[in-house]
Image (cartoon, grey):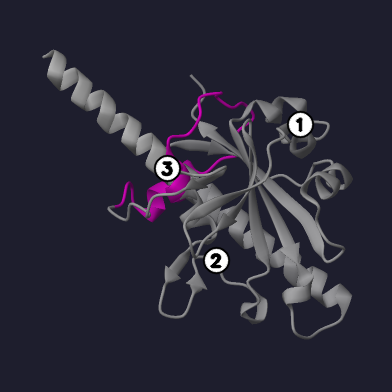
Amino acid sequence: MKKLTITIALFVLVLNISAQDGDNIRLNPPDLSGRMNVMEAFQNRQSASEFDTEKLNLQDLSDLLWAANGINRPDNGKRTAPSAINAQDIDIYVIMESGAYLYDASKLLLKLVTPKDLRKLAAGRQENMAKAPLICLLVSDISKFTRGSDSLKLAWAGMDAGIVSQNISIYCAGAGLSTRPRATMDSRGLRDALKLTENQYPLLNNPVSYKKK
């Protein structure tokens, strides 16, 4: 029994180590086995006002991000969320206690941007939103649009962010998670902390957690 316990402990340790890539977090491939059907997900969709503080496990985090804006057609790099003129302008910054990370869909990786906990900046004046273990911040880089005026690019950006946010909402409804699409945040503080360029616009954010116990 003691030998079995040690073996299990070593196996868990290896899994934890394999999920790390320096200060980055290596994600799992998405679990495509399915949970509930899409109509049940729509029936369950709602905007949460309270969030549990338990951290999401690695598979749930991986599945969430893939559903939000992952690559579902590896042969051409296209995404689960459409974008205007296929600009793929939306970046997802995952904001957690351990830091803020940029989602790299092609490498299934969360790249550390800063070790600071920026959840209060993402929560803005609605401080209770910072209790969620993670917040998905949707940022559009309008320089990825190859044509159009700045006002048109910003309109496209808002549309693209809304689609990714809806993907998050429907995934959470189907997976038994809580979320809420939000535009409230400290945009200037986030711009500074994440070192965003003048072409990058924080547009929406989705706090995500397990159902409140």
* Measured Cα–Cα span from mark 1 to mark 3: 26 Å
Q: 97 or 82, which is in the foreground? A: 97
Residue where numbered disc 1 is placed: 120
- The earlier-in-sequence mark between 1 and 2 is 2
Q: 166 or 14, which is in the foreground? A: 14
In terms of image quadrants, where is residue 73?
bottom left
User: Furthest residue to the bottom?
Assistant: 147
Residue where numbered disc 2 is placed: 81
Q: Any mark on residue 19, and which?
A: 3
Are the two marked residues, 1 and 2, in contact with CB atoms closer than 8 angstroms?
no
In terms of image quadrants, where is residue 153?
bottom right
Q: 106 or 7, which is in the foreground? A: 7
Q: Nearer the viewer, mark 1 or mark 3?
A: 3
Q: Position of residue 56 (x, y in %)?
A: 47, 34
Q: Position of residue 129 (x, y in %)?
A: 69, 30
Q: Is residue 180 visible?
A: no
147 relative position to 174: left or right: right
Question: Which segment is the magenta one?
Answer: 34-63
* Measured Cα–Cα span from mark 2 to mark 3: 26 Å
Q: Position of residue 12 (x, y in %)?
A: 30, 30
Q: Secondary structure at mark 1?
A: helix
